[in-house]
Amino acid sequence: MGVREAPLGKTFSEKILGRKAGKDVQAGEVVSVSPDYILSHDNSAAIIKEFQKLGVAKVRAPGKIVIVLDHIVPAADEKYAQNHKSIREFVAAQGIPNFFDINAGICHQVLPEQGFALPGLVIVGSDSHTPSYGALGAFAAGIGRTETACTWATDEIWLRVPETMRIDLSGRMRPGVFAKDLSLKLIGDRGAEMANYKAVEFAGSAAGDFSVGARLTLANMSAEMGAKNGYFAPDGKTLEWLEGRARAPFTAVASDPDASYESVLAYDLAALEPQIACPHTVDNVKPVSAVAGKRVDQVLIGTCTNGRLEDLEAAAAILRGRKVHPSVRVLVIPASWQVYREALASGALAALVEAGCVVLNSGCGPCLGAHEGLMAAGEVCLSTSNRNFRGRMGHRDSEIYLASPATAAATAVAGEIADPREFS
Amino acid sequence: MSQGKVWKYGDNVNTDVIFPGRYTYQIMTPEEMAGHAMEDLDPAFAAGVKPGDVVLAGKNFGCGSSREQAAACLKAAGVQAVVARSFARIYFRNAINLGLAVLQCDGAVDALENGDEVDVDFARGEIRSARGTFRFLPLPDSVLGIIEAGGLLEYTKKKLAKE
């Protein structure tokens, strides 16, 4: 009596990694697995250099390697141009079939759109926002460059099976409130290390209400919670979205009802109002109303967090028929060329351009501070991206605020931080 | 066992201040990387750090991007260990995979101050100083092989050579 013979239920991480490892695993164990896909981007140039130190001529599984140029596209200077060139040469020499050049978009939008990110798969990527693919039910985690090079050579990587934090969502968000606001609220309440090393599972009655785009925003922002991966159990919306996109058959995996969770949080979406992360950490979060009136110099709408069609539509809904404030520069970056074409067709881009926004090539843009709209000392940017660390988008004495595309659009019109609910 | 000076910082020291993003895609030598270490957090660090010194920090050291330079620049600067309450996940992986010791030790973080002289004894799992001796959590066996080989590259090289 009291001794449990059968193992406890499993979380999705334990199931996916257990299936890959070919054994029963539980949180805390370190397993060695062969991933389904290995992602890298412009940093492939550095990864290639590491790979060449290993003394093997060929990558082990070229079909598993996915390379997307997105960070500095097109190349901003000779150094970046040389990096891109060395990547193209490596791709050709190694026969890597899944290569996306400067006319594709941000890797975290391209992999889902092109049907790589599928339920039940293990995807590792040399980028910290790789957890995005959990939006579609994959186990996806960010890794470093050296281990990416080693995984190219061995088709094997060590992963610690994470404990899982479940976030139960209920209620319905009010107009003007978006998935980004929820992610910022969570990080503001719990701190930037709220889920360090852990998996975050978005669950509860309201999780299924989120579109796939909104799920991608939440899974993407789980990286800012310190999470190893973020996850939504695949449902009808997932399957519908994957229709015609999935590159291979897949098996959806969900956590067992009696799975063991490290912690469970509960949030009522109806109580949420627009949120903003203030300089210089993502967990320095306030309601937008608390910082309304702060003058800004630049607004960025885009990135792997908030550059999808529904994000551009949300911004266009506010900017349509209005003008960008004369003292503000607004940069719009569709997350991918597919989004770019959809936003052209829907009229969203026309509305944004008419309002005075500058539309840039799909890619990371100025988010990581390498090109296309860097900030001078003392300047303030409101961005829909995921990080506001000191100096990230230019001078160390510039400031970055993070918010939703609707808050960004309202701010663009007002010339100062503004609540989008006043612009509906 | 070796001796060094403590450079103490707070919680959530992120990869952007350890190694600024503006240099990330300009491939650099280790010496160049060391010259920019901690540039946006502590402009005095790169010029003052000596081989054997220890970086001491609070929670979630290395949060932010997956850039390996944030571990590589400290190793290149001669830092023998980063001692913190906790590390961000990717930073922890990168540091191990590059052979930079990352140690969790609340006692040392609580007691030690900037500029303190310390000995780090990896064999005994101890940090010793005038303020006392502090024990740290040993790293899991499964990753010790990688550290003992001097990092994942060397470990993988040996493994591939055996195949």
Image (spheres, rainbow, N blue to C red):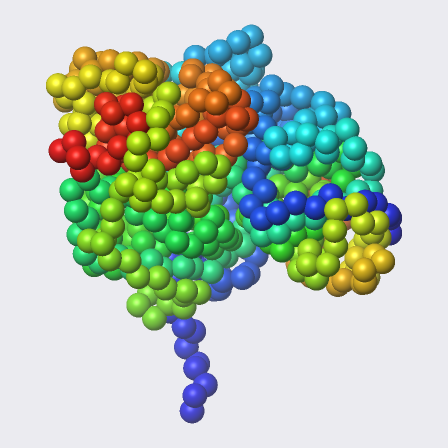
Decide if residue A20 is on the left or right side of residue B61: left
| Residue A274 x %, y % | 27, 42
Q: Where is residue A285 in the image (x, y as percent from the top left)?
A: 39, 44
Frontmost residue, A325 versus A113: A325
Q: Nearer the viewer, residue A161 or A423?
A: A423
Q: Residue at x 57, y 36 (%)?
A: B15
Q: Which residue is drawn at 61% across and 30% down?
A: B40
- The answer to which quarter of the image holds residue B85 is bottom right
Query: What's the residue at 17%, 46% (across, down)?
Result: A174
In the image, residue A93 sits, relative to residue B66, either above or below, namely above
Q: Is residue B79 visible?
A: yes
Quadrant location, the C terminus of chain A: top left
Q: Is residue A248 above or below residue A32?
A: above
A4 vs B96, nearest the viewer:
B96
Furthest residue to the bottom?
A1
Residue A60 seen in the current view = no
Rendered residue at 40%/59% (across/down):
A165
| Figure quadrant of residue A264 | bottom left
Please state, as top left, top right, bottom left or bottom right, where the N terminus of chain A lies in the image. Answer: bottom left
Q: Where is residue A396 in the image (x, y as percent from the top left)?
A: 55, 26
Left or right: residue B127 versus residue A326 is: right
State the image coordinates of residue A65 (x, y, percent, origin top left).
47, 31
Seen in the picture, residue B112 relative to A102 is either above or below; the reply is below
